[in-house]
Image (cartoon, rainbow, N blue to C red):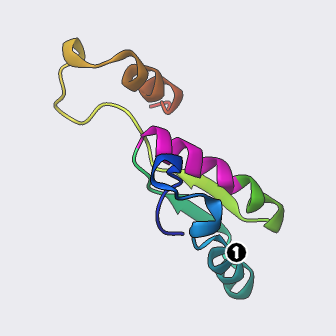
Amino acid sequence: MTGLISPLDGKGPDQLSIRELINRIVADGVTEAILAINPTIEGDATVLLTRIIKPLGCKISHIALGLPVGADLEYADDVTLARAMEGRREI
């Protein structure tokens, strides 16, 4: 899937290559799709489209979001901290 949903730019789900992605998942027997989408409003809206892929038996995951290595917590915003907490792993 390429591009993002962006209503302000006139780009909706029909302008993305979702059908092609679904065809590839089915034809190639893809078992997991890993999304690497910027954490923006447009990116979050686009991630919602994965609901149509899940019934195909394909696991959908998203790369981790949060603080970069070496970042100072003092300068992190609330949303970044919340996403970092949601994606935490046990060590």
**Residue 78 appears at what percent x and percent y?**
39, 15
Q: Residue furthest right?
A: 55
**Residue 26 appears at what percent x and percent y?**
74, 81
Q: Residues within 10 Å of mark 1 (few under 14, many from 20)?
A: some
Amino acid type, mark 1? Ile
Q: How many marks?
A: 1
72 on left or right of 9? left
For the residue pair 67 and 46, the one nearer the viewer reads as 46
What kind of secondary structure does the magenta stretch mostly adopt? helix
Q: Which quadrant is home to the C terminus?
A: top left
Q: Is residue 64 magenta?
A: no
Q: Which residues are magenta?
A: 39-50
Q: Residue furthest top?
A: 74
Residue 40 found in image quarter: top left
Does residue 60 lie above or below 24 as drawn?
above
Q: Which residue is mark 1?
A: 22
Does residue 77 lie above or below 6 as drawn?
above
**Residue 28 appears at what percent x and percent y?**
67, 86
Does residue 40 lie above or below 12 as drawn?
above
- Residue lying at 64% horizontally and 80% vertically, measured from the top left: 20
Q: Residue furthest bottom?
A: 27
- Residue lying at 83% horizontally and 61% vertically, measured from the top left: 55
Q: Which quadrant is home to the N terminus?
A: bottom right
For the residue pair 2 and 28, the one nearer the viewer reads as 2
Q: Is residue 45 magenta?
A: yes
- Residue lying at 25% horizontally and 36% vertically, measured from the top left: 68
